[in-house]
Amino acid sequence: MPVLTSAPISNLAVELLRRSLVLVGTVSRVPAPEYSGPSGGVVTLRVPTPRTANEQATAGSVITYSDLDEVPVAVTVRHFYDACRVSDEDLSMAITDFGRTVLLPQVAAVAERAEDEIAAAMNGLAADATIEWAAAPNVDADLATVLAARERLAIDGVPAGSRYLAVAPDIATRLLSVPMLVRADERGQTNALDEAIVGRIYGLTVVESAALDAGSAIAYHQSGFAFGSMPPVSPPGGVDSTTASDGGVSLRHLLAFDATRLATGSVVSVFAGASVVTDDEAGTTHNRAIRIDTGA
């Protein structure tokens, strides 16, 4: 096999990472160069506030300028990694495709752990007291719940586009019985997000995630959650290491030969974190997302 170096491996790794993520593709992703804030693992992501167009009612009349508005969101990022040691025997004789055999499972592990940060933010939302799923599956009741969630988003001023309904697997099973759902299981799938999309209903793209608590769903706008990832710095001292970024996700891959074991260490790692985006208008704090639980 050809000599391994971290540069092409990192490019492949970040592509595999981007293709492995589900919830990350439905929320705001802020690239690492836009981070600011104190050290210690807390970064400030600046999430743009959705804008509303004005009308020039009379030709030639003075128009109104509005400032760009951003919501500062504090996100705690943590270091997630997967490390494995590959022996000389494996590299020389057993492994013919390093990307498939070694890198793919490493990236999948890191992707799942990073995505759990978004799921934790979603699971941590307080459930809406006025909207809930029926205790047992019921097409009419489940449809009414989706409509109520849609109405709440509209009342809260959430833009009509980029609305999602992330659901646990048991809720996805319910919704697949709703006739109004435009199912997505007959189209070609290209990545993890496409494969996780159950369908669309009343302007909401329904996405399934096993990381969500059973019996729950989150209705939200894309800007309702912020996800940040940044690659660790490349270590000094002759370690073959490269960082890569794509589509708002980043990672580092390094290769290090251990002469005492005659083996090569492969390590994929990323700093990642997520947080709920809240708005504060006239002293009232509200989210761009609502959590729907199952009633007793």
Image (cartoon, rainbow, N blue to C red):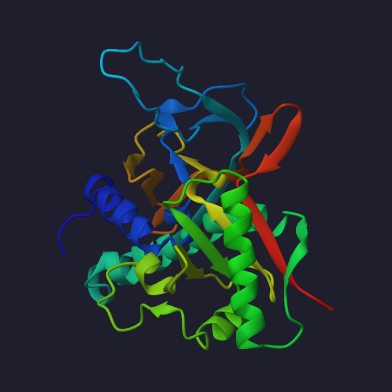
Q: Position of residue 11 (x, y in %)?
A: 26, 49
Q: Is residue 277 visible?
A: yes
Q: Nearer the viewer, residue 152 or 133?
A: 152
Does residue 90 lie above or below 156 as drawn?
A: below
Q: Which residue lies at the image location 77% right of the left edge and 55% below the top edge? A: 126
Q: Which residue lies at the image location 35% right of the left edge and 82% below the top edge? A: 185
Q: Which residue lies at the image location 66% right of the left edge and 88% below the top edge? A: 138
Does residue 188 lie above or below 106 as drawn?
A: below
Image quarter where the C terminus lies is: bottom right
Image quarter where the N terminus lies is: bottom left
What is the residue that sits farthest to the front in this orientation?
Answer: 58
Left or right of 109 in this view: 278:
right
What is the residue that sits farthest to the left in this orientation?
Answer: 2
Q: Nearer the viewer, residue 52 or 204?
A: 52
Left or right of 125 in this view: 57:
left
Q: Which residue lies at the image location 47% right of the left edge and 59% below the top edge? A: 111
When asked about the image quadrant of residue 57, the answer is: top left
Q: Position of residue 115 (x, y in %)?
A: 53, 57
Q: Is residue 226 visible?
A: no
When asked about the image quadrant of residue 96, the answer is: bottom left
Q: Nearer the viewer, residue 134 or 233?
A: 134
Q: Position of residue 168 (x, y in %)?
A: 60, 74
